[in-house]
Image (cartoon, rainbow, N blue to C red):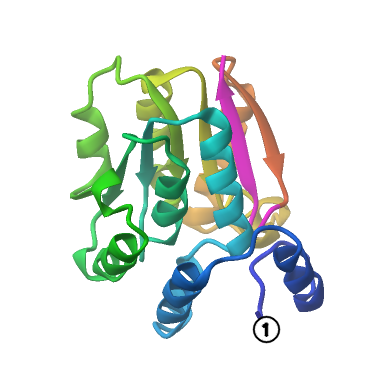
Amino acid sequence: MADPKSFHLSAEIHDYLVAHGSPPDDIERALIAETARLGDISRMQIAPEQGALLRTLTRLLGARSAIEVGTFTGYSALCIARGLVDGGRLLCCDVSDEWTSIGRKYWAEAGVADRIDLRIAPALDTLRALPLDANIDLAFIDADKPSYLAYFEELVPRLRQNGLLIVDNVLWSGNVVDDTMTDDNTNAIRAFNDHLAADRRVEAVMLAVSDGITLARKI
């Protein structure tokens, strides 16, 4: 990739780390390529190393119930769904039928379409309709930044003990430490990061993977 998303990595190092993990297979590469043809908006897609991380974490948890907030063209959903145990289900929340429709054919080709329940509606409405005892194993947030805190507050009570919450874009291209950046997205991410770091319901680690990713285990 000529312009890797991974934080402060050269293109050469990024290619090396992807090649020395579990690289995307033919289905995933085809989805990445189709998304790239959308132009600049394609940067909303997670990086390949994030996809491998999501799949690995899902498998390590033995996850049966997962939720994704922000599906875009479906690459992260594909990776999570592939990591679920037999009979597992992933609930995807998004507002774009146009973008998510791209992912549907790749989910089917990978044989995981029956594991994915895509809801085209405001994510907060979908989350609030879930029972508080939903017993979710894994949740992934990668959507509109001003709503991160609201999504977090809806998801944490619904996670099981030792369930995992994963949050993308927490470094926001380094803008979180640039005092000259005061736009709504940057301020929202700063506020969310501060809130999560102080929340005693979770144990968290922030990693410099792609644009920054936080892993939070429910205590």
Question: Height in image: 154 above or below 145?
Answer: above
Label 1, residues with CA under 10 Å away: few <14, some 14-19, many ≥20: few
Place residue 147 in its image quadrant: top left
Would residue 10 be found to the left or right of residue 124 on screen? Answer: right
Place residue 4 in its image quadrant: bottom right
Question: Height in image: 94 above or below 158?
Answer: below
Would residue 100 be found to the left or right of residue 121 on screen? Answer: right
Image quadrant where one finds the N terminus: bottom right
Residue at 24%, 67% in the rendered image: 101
Where is mark 1, residue-wise? 2
Q: Is residue 17 magenta?
A: no
Residue at 36%, 46% in the rendered image: 69
**Is any part of residue 116 visible from this angle?**
no
Question: Height in image: 112 above or below 66?
Answer: below
| Residue 194: image location, x then y, percent | 61, 33
Q: Which residues are magenta?
A: 209-219
| Residue 128: image location, x then y, percent | 23, 29
The one of 28 and 173 positioned closer to us in this rendering: 28
